Amino acid sequence: PNGASHVSKGTAQTRLPLRIVLRLAIQTALHRHDGPAEAASIATYYTRANKTEVALFLETLAALGNVRRLDDGRFAAFK
């Protein structure tokens, strides 16, 4: 194969499902959290969580209308 049609591990195509799972996991953690939370608090639910990525996922979820971003910067789940 010439490599053009080969998809190696670590490409955006193979990471996409993982990113979807992470977004769902982060949204679930926010739902289980006792009240609104900062991204850093949600990141503590996961051993290897990158706080910056958790914040980006929460911002994305807020932009999509899946969670609320409060005026003070915390995030809240719709209940």
Image (tube, rainbow, N blue to C red):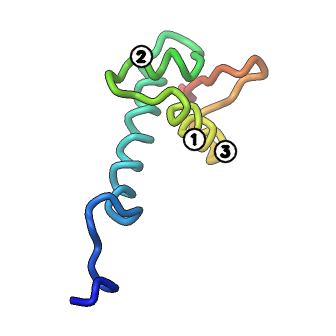
As drawn, the label of residue 63 is 3
Q: Nearer the viewer, mark 1 or mark 2?
A: 2
As drawn, the label of residue 31 is none
Q: What is the C-alpha distance between the residues marked 3 and 2? A: 22 Å
Q: Nearer the viewer, mark 3 or mark 2?
A: 2
Q: Is residue 44 left or right of residue 9?
A: right
- The residue closer to the viewer here, 52 or 61, is 52
- The residue closer to the viewer here, 43 or 2, is 2
Circle 3 SS class: helix
- The residue closer to the viewer here, 13 or 42, is 13
Circle 1 SS class: helix
Residue type, mark 2 in image: Thr
Task: Please identify the residue farthest to the front as the structure is shown.
Answer: 2
Q: Residue under label 2, please give it.
A: 44
Q: Is 23 above or below relative to 77?
A: below
Crowd class of label 3 (few under 14; some 14 to 19; many from 20; radius 10 Å): few
Task: Please identify the residue farthest to the right as the structure is shown.
Answer: 71
Q: Position of residue 28 (x, y in %)?
A: 41, 30
Q: Quarter-wise, where is residue 62 in the image?
A: top right
* Residue shown at the point (40%, 49%) measured from the top left: 20
Q: Residue under label 1, please give it.
A: 61
Residue type, mark 1 in image: Leu
Q: Quarter-wise, where is residue 24 in the image?
A: top left
Q: Position of residue 42 (x, y in %)?
A: 48, 20
Crowd class of label 1 (few under 14; some 14 to 19; many from 20; radius 10 Å): many
Cβ atoms under marks 1 and 3 closer than 8 Å: yes
Q: Is residue 32 left or right of residue 51?
A: left
Q: Which quadrant of the rendered structure holds the N terminus?
A: bottom left
* Residue shown at the point (65%, 20%) measured from the top left: 74
Residue type, mark 3 in image: Ala
